[in-house]
Image (cartoon, coloured by chain):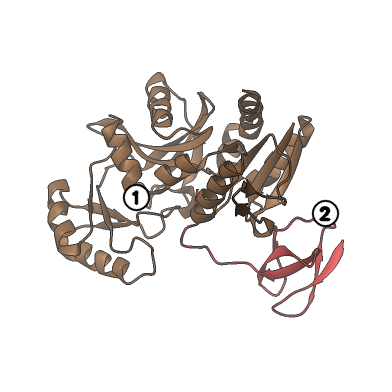
Chain colours: A brown, B red
Amino acid sequence: MRIGVTYDILRWEERDILEKGRRMGMEVIPIHLDEVIFSMDGNGVKSQTLGEMDSIIQRSISHTRAYLTSALMESAGYMVFNGSSTIERAGNKAIASSLLSSRGVPTPKTVVGLQREVALKAAHTLGFPVVIKPVEGSWGRMTAKAEDEDSLWSFMEYQEGTSLKYRNVFYLQQFIRKPGRDIRVFVIGDEVPVGIYRINDSNWRTNTALGAKAEPVDINSELRDLALKAREVFGGIFLGIDVFEDPKEGYLVNEVNTVPEYKNTARVTGYDITGTLLTKLREASRK
Amino acid sequence: MAQLKCPICGGQVSVEDDALPGELVEHECGAQLEVFKKNETLSLRLAEEVGEDWGE
């Protein structure tokens, strides 16, 4: 079995996939996306730089490159995990929230507006404080809590002054009073084998990239069902699903990550995420 | 070990022979460097700061 791993920066996860895959008897080929060329004409899409592959794992650190190259590799006939449709829909928070809501998956109340005054007015339906996030982005970057209308106005002004693609789209969410932590669970194939609490007592943003501590979580049936329901919405073979515990409403799916990092989860749980991922990939490639 | 040149300070940087493009290397001058391929040989460039669309 020959599996490609497309990437930009070789992180712990990509290295582990290369090493474990080889130990599992697979031919695992690192594909640095800088070196890939696609050519297209009346006879279809080809990439000589990729060559023959049974399947490809998308591990680009850039949402834009992950989406684009997954789409082009699919057009060239490759089986890619996660595919472009999964990456596109989950990577855009406005689209992801709308899909979760429309499919009945519990998620924080959210408003999306395209104009500052209109979005500000809509924020009152959520009640302050509200959380403002860039429509695309990760690791808690530029995510801010606005305590009142005045600070929200300023945050929106700052956002408009950035070079973000969606700088004029305001994604506002109810502030969930989390118990100093959130939950990250991993869907691998059709299983939810592992997850962590991400604990931060000093910052309401519980991203591990911002210093949250990881601890293993027992995945109960409710969490498992919720994660699998989210997978039904977005598809994909490997998802990192962020879940909030709301004191009144219970579990809420906040975000779905389609190229999830899992170094901390593997470290604190001892679970072999890479091995399970490669096993599922092998099964999917044979279908 | 391959000996490459730091693009920031010009000093020598030791990199494993089987290093891959995209690997990050911390140099003693403080620069975070990224291995990349230039004309089929490994070279070093200043690693990109976190991009706007980077993440999970």
Q: Choose between A232 and A253: the one closer to the eye.
A: A232
Q: Residue furthest right?
A: B1
User: Residue A148 location in percent, x, y?
Assistant: 17, 59
Local crowd size for mark 2, using a 10 Å CA cut-off: few (<14), some (14–19), many (≥20): few
Q: Choose between A199 and A115: the one closer to the eye.
A: A115
Indicate the quadrant containing the C terminus of chain A: top left, top right, bottom left or bottom right.
Answer: top right
- Disc 2 is attached to a residue of which chain? B
| Kind of residue indicated by mark 1 | Trp
Determine the image quadrant of residue A275: top right
Local crowd size for mark 1, using a 10 Å CA cut-off: few (<14), some (14–19), many (≥20): some
Q: Residue at x 52, y 63 (%)?
A: B50
**Separation of disc 2 and disc 1 at Cα?**
42 Å
Q: Residue at x 55, y 38 (%)?
A: A265
Q: Residue at x 41, y 54 (%)?
A: A140
| Kind of residue indicated by mark 2 | Asp
User: Residue A218 location in percent, x, y?
Assistant: 47, 25
Specify whether A187 is left or right of A40: left
Judge depth for marks 2 and 1 and give the one in front. 2
Looking at the rendered structure, the number of numbered marks drawn on it comes to: 2
Specify whether A269 is left or right of A282: left
Query: Which residue in the structure is indicated by mark 1?
Result: A204
- Disc 1 is attached to a residue of which chain? A
Query: Which residue in the structure is indicated by mark 2?
Result: B18
